[in-house]
Image: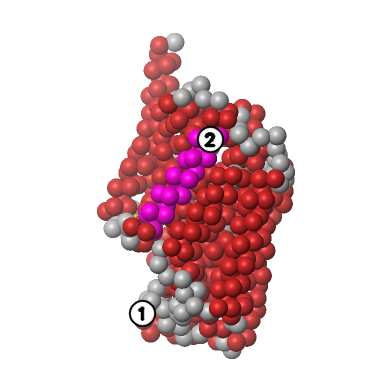
Amino acid sequence: MTTEINGTALAVFIFFFALVTVLGFIAARWRKPATLAHIDEWGLGGRSFGTWITWFLVGGDFYTAYTVIAVPALVYAVGAYGFFALPYTIVVYPFVFMVMPVLWKRARDNGYVTAGDVVHGQYGSRGLELAVAVTGVLATMPYIALQLVGMTVVLKALGLHGELPLAIAFIVLAVYTYSSGLRAPALIAFVKDIMIYIVVIVAVAAIPMKLGGYANVFAAADADFQAKGAGNLLLGGNQYVAYASLALGSALAAFMYPHTLTGIFAANSGTTIRKNAVLLPAYTLLLGLLALLGYMAHAAKLTVESPNDVVPALFQSLFPSWFVGFAFAAIAIGALVPAAVMSIGAANLFTRNFWKAYVNPQVTDAGEAKVAKITSLIVKIGALLVILFLPTQFALDLQLLGGIWILQTLPALVFGLFTNWFRAPGLLAGWFVGFFGGTYLVWLQGLKPLIAISLGGAPFTVYIGILALLANIAVAAAVNLVTRSREAALA
């Protein structure tokens, strides 16, 4: 991959980056509310986003810059196994269609801003609320850091080395998010998603033509996998359970994250959410096309230091400089949108479920918004420090844990929407077992998300997040039975 400065590519990149920066500040006046000094307005856009704004916003924070970099990189390295993201982003939308409108209505009717608010309102438990809030923040931090990983790869490809370019980009992000709140990433998402669609459509049409067609692309990838003795075009028999459990676990976890829930809570109706559950699979098609870039890199005979460099190297080797700059700008902007929403989601959790709950219960609406704004800055700085001072692999490992952690909030958040049978003590005990048990299993596996188990026959590999969730639910149900039995005995 070329890492020298290309003047044309850099100029195009700077132009589009400047464009979204201007849009970020304009967003404070877009659909301008009476005041931004309210967490509903700053952190949720006034709960007023319609179908198309929600589509771009949720798509923008669900399909991130790191997705654009990491999915093709995984397919490049291991082949078919890397396509687990496709069924995951198909399975998730029926879940969204059925569950999220109910959750949105609960939040809207009661003025809830976060998952912690919903849990406290349902169960009246500060302990369970705090567990959900802390889990959300912990799971989000490495996710924000990974957006920086995606941006770092692009900046390196442009020839911008060192820490300063990355720091400048996120200082700009921090300033316009502070001033405009959720409206900034919502407006920028329009530009980002259109650019990504253009890049992917051009790539999947033009690159195979340059490489001799898709038959040659698949043949070259297959030959490389066989030569190195790792990876394949089709799943092996011992990969089916791992593939399926990763897809299912990732789907269930996806809309438990603070940033995806923020996009849901910002919608103006349950109907808007249902429409998005129907429309958002268009991004799954985009993801599938992106994944194919991993195979195309084999046909292009690229030499890269890291699989994460595959996409930038592919564009540099096959496209003119102006389009390289456009593509890199799309990827970098794709880091800004989700990073902004993630920092807002984490800030909302801290403000509502820690500051207001424990520090200042009488905080005013304006005070609440101010705390959220300051916290969003701190969250971005924390993520930046992770990238600057810790090895990138550490952030990647934490993200693997993040998916398992956030999955453990599902019983507390979702079950109460449909039944009053569960009690807070059981759900808190279940969360404890799932959270710490899942963390321990990942630690035993060397910070890998899969574990081999045997049920009397040949061992098979399964996603630890699913095992932890099953243990979570089992413990919650058992403790709940005991709790309810005691209540009945005392009645």
Provide residue 138's location: percent of width, then percent of height.
41, 45
247 or 286, nearer to the observer: 286
Q: Is residue 265 left or right of residue 245?
A: right
Which residue position is annotated with label 1?
229
| 323 lies left or right of 75 | right
Q: Main secondary structure of the magenta part?
A: helix
Residues at marks 1 and 2, CA–CA distance in whole angstroms = 55 Å
Looking at the picture, tell me which residue is in the foreground, 82 or 128. 128
On screen, 207 above or below 459? below
User: Farthest bottom residue?
Assistant: 212
Q: Is residue 293 above or below residue 408?
A: below
Observer able to see residue 319:
yes
User: Which quarter of the rendering shows the C terminus?
Assistant: top left
- Using the rendered image of the protein, determine whether residue 470 is visible from the camera's viewpoint: no
Q: Could you tell me which quadrant the N terminus lies in?
A: bottom left
Residue 18 picture location, percent across and down = 61, 62
Residue 370 bears which disc, if any?
2
Q: Which residues are magenta?
A: 369-387
- Residue 431 as seen in the image, left or right of residue 65: left
Question: Label 1: few (<14), some or many (≥20) within 10 Å?
Answer: few
Front residue of 428 and 345: 345
Residue 431 placement (x, y as % from top left): 39, 37
Is residue 308 shown left or right of residue 59? left
Q: Secondary structure at mark 2?
A: helix
In the rendered image, residue 70, in percent from the top left (x then y), is placed at 47, 66
In primary-sequence order, the first of circles 1 and 2 is 1
The amino acid sitting under disc 2 is Lys
Scheme by which the image is coloured: secondary structure
Q: Residue at x 38, y 28 (%)?
A: 479
